[in-house]
Amino acid sequence: MKDHAWRRPTAAFTLVELLVVIAIIGVLIALLLPAVQQAREAARRIQCNNNLKQLGLALHNYHDTYLVFPPGKTGDDFPDSYTGATAARRLGWTVFIYPFIEQDNLYEQFVPYMNGTLQLGTPATWPASGTRVAGLNCPSDPNGAKSIGLTSSGEQRERAFHNYSGCMGSTGSMIGSDNSGTQLDGMFFSASEIRMRDVTDGTSNTAMVGEIRLAEADTSLSGDSGDDWRGFAFNMAAPNVWFSTRNPPNTATADQLGRCRQDIADMPCVKVSVSNDNMYLHARSMHPGGALVGLADGSVRFIPETIHTDTFQFLGSRNDGQVLGEF
């Protein structure tokens, strides 16, 4: 019988070694994922910051052209009736700057309705009113691509929503017993006609635009009870695209609006009467720790959630004469 040569056993992983390697890989992934997420959020925040800078530039160009900033909304009351030649009422400020953010063709589709040549109810019914403009949405908001709203009968309709809102000032829509939204101390309100000279606190001390968060409509609910107007500029029966500095960004205090979802814990809202009650939205974002706000001088600042309430209120007013603290 032929002798078999002795061979060294083939090297191999033991089960324990394999488990250790898997555990090490798991730890490395656990350490890497937050870093990747932080890098992605940093990139999204930079893009959001740039969007607000472009909005500030567009608003300045609008002012240079017309010697006034666009109205917060057309029409001088809430909910503001629209009939006949007044069909352009309830139109929010963002639409007016479309030509200044390279959306001339889209804007031209609205012109016949804005000047009364064509008449078709509220701006929410205008053709192309559901066309999204990417530069008006924050990439960090998971609902930034929201494109569906509900009619009063509960019908789903394609609609455009914006994450960026104009500053209405340091209060809600109601001043004393007046809920028209025409006496506010911010840059945008009902039928507003603010000029640079009206910003007596200084453009570097006055908020002009900022972030709000969007909420998807709950299409399972009947009628308009599942609709959410936050960010909707084509039916301004409420301050849909205005934010108030009455409370710091991402406050736990609920927004108050004519239509909004009341079941979202981190962006609470209470439904109120658009004809009789105080209405307001708060600055909110998905950026950790605060929200981005564009000032009237065109600069953009990150406003932390920890900002003193008084300081944030002073920042929202264009003419209160108050000296800002650190922010």
Image (tube, rainbow, N blue to C red):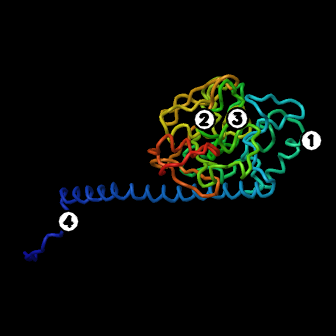
Residue neighbourhood size for the residue with mark 3, other residues' Cα within 10 Å, grouped as few (<14), some (14–19), many (≥20): some
Q: Which residue is mark 1?
A: 117
**First in sequence: mark 1 vs mark 3:** 1
| Residue 210 located left or right of residue 311 | right
Q: Secondary structure at mark 4?
A: loop
**Tag 3 residue:** 183
Query: Where in the figure is residue 236, as x and y percent of width and height?
Result: 72, 35
Say which mark, if any, is on residue 12: 4
| Residue 265 visible in the picture | yes
* Residue 171: assigned label: 2
CA distance for labels 1 and 4: 82 Å
In what element is the residue under mark 2? loop
Report the side of 247 relative to 317 (left or right): left
- First of labels 3, 4 by sequence position: 4
The secondary element bearing badge 3 is classed as loop
What type is the residue that disc 4 sits on? Answer: Ala
Residue 201 position within the rendered picture, expressed as x and y whole percent measured from the top left: 62, 49
Quadrant location of residue 259? top right
